[in-house]
Structure formats: structure tokens, C-alpha cells
Amino acid sequence: MEMATTVSTATTAIPTTSTPTMHAAEEGEENEEEALPPTRRKKSIHYIMQSRDKDNEYLKEFIHSDLCVEFQEKAEWRSWAWSKKTSQLKKEIVESYAVAKNVDVVLAAMQRAGRERSEKVVFFDMASGKGFTSIVLAKKFPSSTVHMLDNNKNMNLSHLDAVPTVQFKNIDLFSEEAESLIMDALIEHDGFGVMVGMHLCGNLSRRAIEMWTNIMTKGEKLRANSFNLGLVLSPCCLPHKVRVPKRKYNDFGYWIQSTQRQFGIDGYDLWATSLYNLVCSHVGHTMRSTQKRFFRDENLLSPTNWFILVTPMEAKRNDICQPCV
């Protein structure tokens, strides 16, 4: 959590004799600006490039990228590059490049599993916000399509004009419509895609795993051996503590706070481990095996740095547990 810093500014009394000069300057502001050389405001992107974290693996990759150059030069990125929230922008950059790195890991695992990588790969950025992760993926995979999925319809998304392969959909991720949208897009892209969720809050992390499982199972009726859909997930906070009648979606995870106090376990570690264990070792009616990875990424600028990677593998009969004799 970023801590707000209050800066106090000393005020100097101005002699009354200078007051007419002040009014004259205010009235002739345009002429004054024309007379003096323009002052170049330092942008957030410049602070980031000079940051003490500039040697961070992901920040360094961004600083040396074409996207960083665009941030400095193109008006489309002004809402980010000129933002006063430098720390928030830096955090989004690092997290987005971490996701992109792990997308590479999942795609490589699919290829090792015998799945030929399609040029029509499609990405689904869950709870995307303004879509920095989507933009990074679009730049890294220029022939791909990226779907930003978020239930906030009041965001300024004018910057998406600069990335035509990114599409925004205002949608409730807990709805069946969200699953249908992903399935339809997969059908259009040879069934090859990756769902990504960076720091999904509370029940959204559980929902991402549930959606992946449902889509892989339903896909068996539409395609031989279902879809080739990977998952890159980094969970964030625990589900908000509410009474049982108000638990809108699922009871999963509400026990974690009491358990961490009882056994002295870190709540976030327990939450991330529980989500990892929620991913099935086999998925669908054909019992297709899955490859799971669970690790911390110490290069994130946040203590909530667990990643869960899921890759569907080939359906093999000998993968299925046989009954004991």
C-alpha cells in the first residue's frame, strides 16, 4: 500500500507595493507565457526512468522498450505518462511485465505438450482496469487479440486508440456472459489463448480458476480435446469478511482469517496456497491433465507476489488414477 506524503510549503508575505504587478501579470498571462521560454514539466515517466528501482528486471525491460519511447512522445499516453501518481504507474509497469514473462512460460509449456502455437492467440485480461497489462501483451504479441474485461464502465480509455488489437468489454466476471465471451473468442482464434489476472482481489481470484475450469470442461463439447487455454494468476487480498447470508458467490476463503490467527500463518500465503490447491490436476470429462506452477516473484514491488500458472496438457489414459485392487 502506497503511503501518502504531505508536503508543507512555506508562504512568504508579498509587499503591498507589488500587488498591481501581480494583477497585471494575471491579466496578461498569455502575453507573459509568449514572452518567456516555455517551462517543460517533468512527467511521471521521467521520474520512473530515474527511479532507485530502475535496475528492477521488469522496470529495466520497460525503460528499454519502444513503449517507453511512446510514453514520452505520444499524446495517447498522457493520462499515464503525465500522471502525478508515479508510484502507482511504476507498480503497474512492473506487474504487467511480470505477467507477460509468465505468459511466455505458459505458451512454451503448451508447445512442449505438443500443442502447435497458433498465430491467432487471444488473451483475456481479467479485471483489467485501464489495461496496462493488455497494452504490454499487445505490444509483445502484435498478431494477437487482447480482451480487456472489467465491470467499471467509467474509465478513460482514450489511450486504446493507440493499440487497435486491444478490445474493452464492460462485463461482470461472475456472469455466464463472461464465460461465453471467452469461449466465443477462443473458437475464433483456433482455441488457443491465455487468461491473465494480476492481483485479482478477493473472490475474483477464485472466480478466475472457476472460469478456467468451466471453459475447459464446456469446450469438450465444441472441440476435440477442448481448448488450449492457459492461466496466469497472481492473487491479491482475501475475500472481504462478511456474514454468511451476505456471501454472494462462495464460502471459499472466508475461514482464512481465523485460521491464520489460530496457527500464526501469514494470511496471504495461506490464501495463495489454497487457490493453488483449488486448481484440479485433471480437468473435464476426459480427465485432461494440467501442469501447475506456484512460486513467488521477488522482482515485484509488492509483498503480494505469488503466481499460479496453469497449462492444459494432453489427455492420456495413464494419467488417470486407477482404482485400487
Image (cartoon, rainbow, N blue to C red):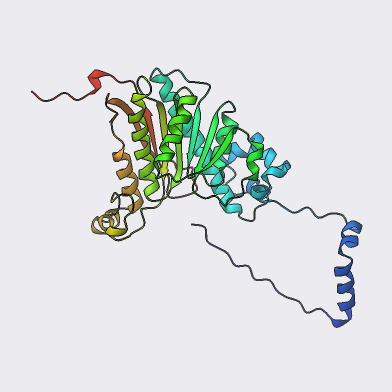
Q: Is residue 192 left or right of residue 71?
A: left
Where is residue 304 drawn, in percent x and y?
Answer: 42, 49
**Residue 3 in the image: above or below residue 44:** below
**Residue 5 in the image: above or below residue 135:** below
- The answer to whether residue 314 shows anywhere in this view is yes
Which quadrant holds residue 222?
top left
Which quadrant holds residue 308?
top left
Q: Residue furthest left?
A: 325
Where is residue 194 drawn, in percent x and y?
Answer: 45, 31
Residue for point 43% across, 29% down: 106
Q: Is residue 142 left or right of residue 115?
A: right
Which one is nearer the viewer's eye here, 246 or 48?
246
**Residue 254 in the image: above or below residue 195:** below
Where is residue 54 drawn, in percent x and y?
Answer: 60, 44
Where is residue 37 drawn, in percent x and y?
Answer: 87, 55
- The answer to whether residue 56 shows anywhere in this view is no
Q: Dividing the image into 4 quarters, which one contains the C terminus?
A: top left
